[in-house]
């Protein structure tokens, strides 16, 4: 579970990172709205903890811009702004929850668990995933592209499902190792294994078709999208 903390106060950001890592979350920190916005457009996170009073682009601007471009990762606002109007503005701008500073760390953990449970439940209710002319059915586990059924192994199906859930975003090998292969300790890297599976999946879903959906982003990972690039 990877959390991005967007917080400009180093002591606060450091305390959050330390506390969350002690609870076995992966944590990255962005010290400004611009930095946070950039990272959310180039990396994949499971949750965002967002301060509102940020230098340059403030939290509401970041959140509004992200939601307008279809960003659906849950966002929990952490802020000293405690008026009713501020809470309403944050929630109306697309936040999933709102917690006023100072807060007790156990309450933050409870809010995080609640937001992530809600997100998991919503994802489980999705029965099909689509991209361009490719359909993936989570119930029948059937994959069809341009009216042609594609036979995938169980691992290839899980890999394609994961990529489709994060379509348009870059998925790193670390994420695939952690979430698809369920390997948390990468003392033995899975990069070669992942690359072999990606190559096989690419041959099956892209080989016969003109529009290529699965792309390698050099030095970063992989992405799927339905645009010609």
Image (tube, helix red, strand yellow):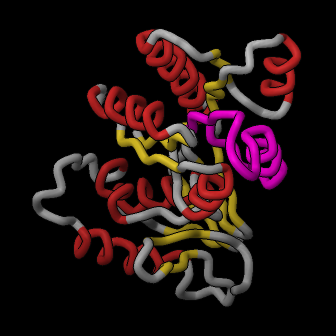
Tell me if I can see residue 136 in this picture.
no
Percent position of residue 200, x then y? 38, 78
Asked whether 122 or 116 is in front, the reply is 116
Quarter of the image with the C terminus is bottom right
Asked if residue 44 is among those painted magenta in the image, a careful observer would answer: no
Tell me if I can see residue 207 in this picture.
yes
Q: Residue at x 75, y 43 (%)?
A: 58
In this view, 55 is above or below 169? above
Asked if residue 53 is among those painted magenta in the image, a careful observer would answer: yes
Count of numbered tags: 0
Percent position of residue 159, x then y? 42, 59
Q: Which residue is drawn at 34% across and 26% down?
A: 19
In this view, 79 is above or below 190? above
Q: Residue at x 59, y 30 (%)?
A: 119
Please give the range of residues in magenta.
48-74
Percent position of residue 95, x then y? 73, 30
Percent position of residue 134, x then y? 66, 66
* Left or right: where 56 falls relative to 185: right
Q: Which residue is drawn at 72% across and 69% down?
A: 133
């Amino acid at each position: 579970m990877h959390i991005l903390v967007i917080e400009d106060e180093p002591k606060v950001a450091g305390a959050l990172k330390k506390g969350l890592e002690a609870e076995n979350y992966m944590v990255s920190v962005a010290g400004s709205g611009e930095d946070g916005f950039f990272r959310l457009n180039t990396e994949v996170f499971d949750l965002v903890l967002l301060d509102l009073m940020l230098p340059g682009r403030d939290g509401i601007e970041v959140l509004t811009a992200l939601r307008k471009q279809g960003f659906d990762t849950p966002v929990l606002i952490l802020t000293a702004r405690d008026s009713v109007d501020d809470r309403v503005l944050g929630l109306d701008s697309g936040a999933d929850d709102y917690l006023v500073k100072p807060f007790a760390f156990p309450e933050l953990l409870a809010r995080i668990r609640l937001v992530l449970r809600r997100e998991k439940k919503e994802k489980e209710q999705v029965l099909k995933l689509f991209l361009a002319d490719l359909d993936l059915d989570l119930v029948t586990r059937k994959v069809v592209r341009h009216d042609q059924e594609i036979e995938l192994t169980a691992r290839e199906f899980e890999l394609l499902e994961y990529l489709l859930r994060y379509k348009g975003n870059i998925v790193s090998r670390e994420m695939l190792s952690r979430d698809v292969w369920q390997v948390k300790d990468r003392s033995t890297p899975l990069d070669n294994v992942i690359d072999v599976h990606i190559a096989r999946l690419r041959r099956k879903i892209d080989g016969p078709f003109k529009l290529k959906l699965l792309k390698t982003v050099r030095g970063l990972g992989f992405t799927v999208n339905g645009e010609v690039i």
